[in-house]
Image (cartoon, rainbow, N blue to C red):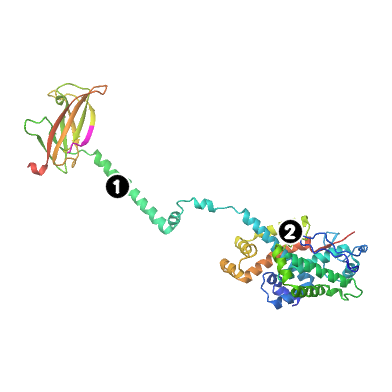
């Protein structure tokens, strides 16, 4: 393993948990305070707003909390981006890890990333490069992988601890129960049964706009709970 | 794509519902990696979709099964027919009319008819004389009352009760009944009257049998009296 490789957080998809590509011992964790705006009513959880210089500095220094947040935040985005482009959850996981490894490698270089605000765009760019290399190397490797390993569904809750996952599920259940039976049936046909969207809309007598608005409203109702449980950065005292 | 465009177009929903072109996807992904608000919005929507899919599967599995109950409904095919107002209303109306007619017209008429006195032709039966049978005229509109001398029929012996039976020309039993011994008339004879309603007797040979019965039910020898029935017009 290269001495330059830092501790690479696992792109947690429910497998390969705890595996690290480590060559260098992590530096000591810096004192806390990631952001300046405490959230309402809670002194220990702050709301994440943007990637700034301080965030970048903590990431470079190997701060565990920041690193965990960085991985958790971008893992979901990378998986959403990749799952529509490659086959197999294990392939998505591999590409995620490769993306993180390359990003952190660059960040730990002197002047590796000059503008903290471009961290997100940088991650996206690196992912695109990894993806292109995967396409070029694809064929034999990808098809074998697709045949040998089972397709695992995307679980947005995999990175959440059990308590948070239970609360998230309870919120979703509540939202679903409050929906009219027709709307619930519509979501079931689209999400669970994975039927053709146009056919489902015809059956239920709605158009694609209705489906989009239905999902939007449900998401808006869910988002408050989501941000409260998942979107925050824990602060180490 | 900038933030306003992403919000106005509900880009997160369109992205997850696969409603974007390849160029739109690239543009949105570039924005969403840079914009924390849209990034969190997309993640919230994706998490909701994934969790909702699992919850909907559990709801579907927990839904009560009604197919088995429907299969056992043998008359289910009939029910919708009568559940239709266009059919059920006239059917019930017709039933009400029939019930009303029976209760208000037919039954009272029958009760009245049964309770009304009626005139009947009387014929006293006696044993056939040598070579000829008794002839009784019968009409389709008038009944016949047959006076049967029961004691005389059984050789003058008195019995507590008598059994009387009527047979048609084919030997088929038309009617039979038991009656307690009547009081003797002025001549000392004991008679019972068998009232035959109008239209019961047709042209032909009939027979009446009389048997005296003891209290224990034991019978005596049976006496048989035959007679010919003619239409009343022929007898004129």
Q: Chain of mark 1?
A: B
x, y (%) of residue B223?
16, 27
Residue at coordinates 13% horizontally, 33% vertically from top-left?
B226
- Whether tag 1 and tag 2 are in contact, CB under 8 A, the answer is no
x, y (%) of residue A28?
93, 62
Q: Which residues are magenta?
A: B170-176
Image-quadrant location for residue B59: bottom right
Q: Which residue is mark 2?
A: A168
Residue at coordinates 72% horizontally, 66% vertically from top-left?
A145
Q: Residues within 10 Å of mark 2 (few under 14, many from 20)?
A: many
For the image shown, how many numbered marks are present on the structure?
2
Q: Which residue is mark 1?
A: B105
**Is B205 located above or below residue B91 in the figure?**
above
Image-quadrant location for residue B225: top left
Residue B185: mark: none
Q: Chain of mark 2?
A: A
As helix, strand or loop, the secondary structure at mark 2 comes to helix
Q: Nearer the viewer, residue A38 or A124?
A: A124
Q: Residues within 10 Å of mark 1 (few under 14, many from 20)?
A: few
């Amino acid at each position: 393993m290269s001495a330059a490789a830092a501790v690479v957080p696992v792109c947690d998809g429910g497998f390969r948990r705890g595996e690290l590509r480590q060559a260098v011992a992590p530096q000591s964790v810096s004192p806390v305070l990631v952001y300046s705006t405490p959230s309402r009513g809670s002194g220990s959880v702050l709301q994440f707003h943007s990637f700034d210089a301080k965030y970048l500095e903590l990431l470079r220094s190997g701060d565990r909390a920041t690193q965990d947040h960085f991985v958790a935040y971008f893992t979901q985005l990378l998986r959403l981006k990749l799952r529509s482009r490659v086959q197999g959850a294990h392939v998505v996981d591999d590409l995620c890890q490769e993306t993180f490894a390359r990003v952190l490698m660059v960040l730990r270089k002197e002047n590796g990333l000059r503008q903290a605000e471009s961290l997100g765009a940088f991650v996206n760019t690196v992912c695109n490069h990894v993806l292109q290399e995967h396409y070029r190397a694809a064929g034999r490797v990808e098809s074998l992988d697709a045949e040998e390993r089972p397709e695992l569904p995307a679980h947005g809750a995999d990175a959440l601890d059990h308590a948070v996952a239970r609360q998230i599920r309870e919120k979703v259940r509540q939202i679903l129960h409050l929906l009219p039976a027709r709307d619930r049936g519509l979501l079931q046909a689209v999400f669970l049964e994975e039927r053709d969207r146009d056919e489902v809309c015809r059956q239920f007598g709605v158009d694609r706009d209705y489906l989009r608005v239905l999902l939007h409203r449900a998401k808006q109702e869910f988002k408050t709970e989501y941000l409260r449980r998942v979107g925050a950065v824990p602060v180490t005292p | 794509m900038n933030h306003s465009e992403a919000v106005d177009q509900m880009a997160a929903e369109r992205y997850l519902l696969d409603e974007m072109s390849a160029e739109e996807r690239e543009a949105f992904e570039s924005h969403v990696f840079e914009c924390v608000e849209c990034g969190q919005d997309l993640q919230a929507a994706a998490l909701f979709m994934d969790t909702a899919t699992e919850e909907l599967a559990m709801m579907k599995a927990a839904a009560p099964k009604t197919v088995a109950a429907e299969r056992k409904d043998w008359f289910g095919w009939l029910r919708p027919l009568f559940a239709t107002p266009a059919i059920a209303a006239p059917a019930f109306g017709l039933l009400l009319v029939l019930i009303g007619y029976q209760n208000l017209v037919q039954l009272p008429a029958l009760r009245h008819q049964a309770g009304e006195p009626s005139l009947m032709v009387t014929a006293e039966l006696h044993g056939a004389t040598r070579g000829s049978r008794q002839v009784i005229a019968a009409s389709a509109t008038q009944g016949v009352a047959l006076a049967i001398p029961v004691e005389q029929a059984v050789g003058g012996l008195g019995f507590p009760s008598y059994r009387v039976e009527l047979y048609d020309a084919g030997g088929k039993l038309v009617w039979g009944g038991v009656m307690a011994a009547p009081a003797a008339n002025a001549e000392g004879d004991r008679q019972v009257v068998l009232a035959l309603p109008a239209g019961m007797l047709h042209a032909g040979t009939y027979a009446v049998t009389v048997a005296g019965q003891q209290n224990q039910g034991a019978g005596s020898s049976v006496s048989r009296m035959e007679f010919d029935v003619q239409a009343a017009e022929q007898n004129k």
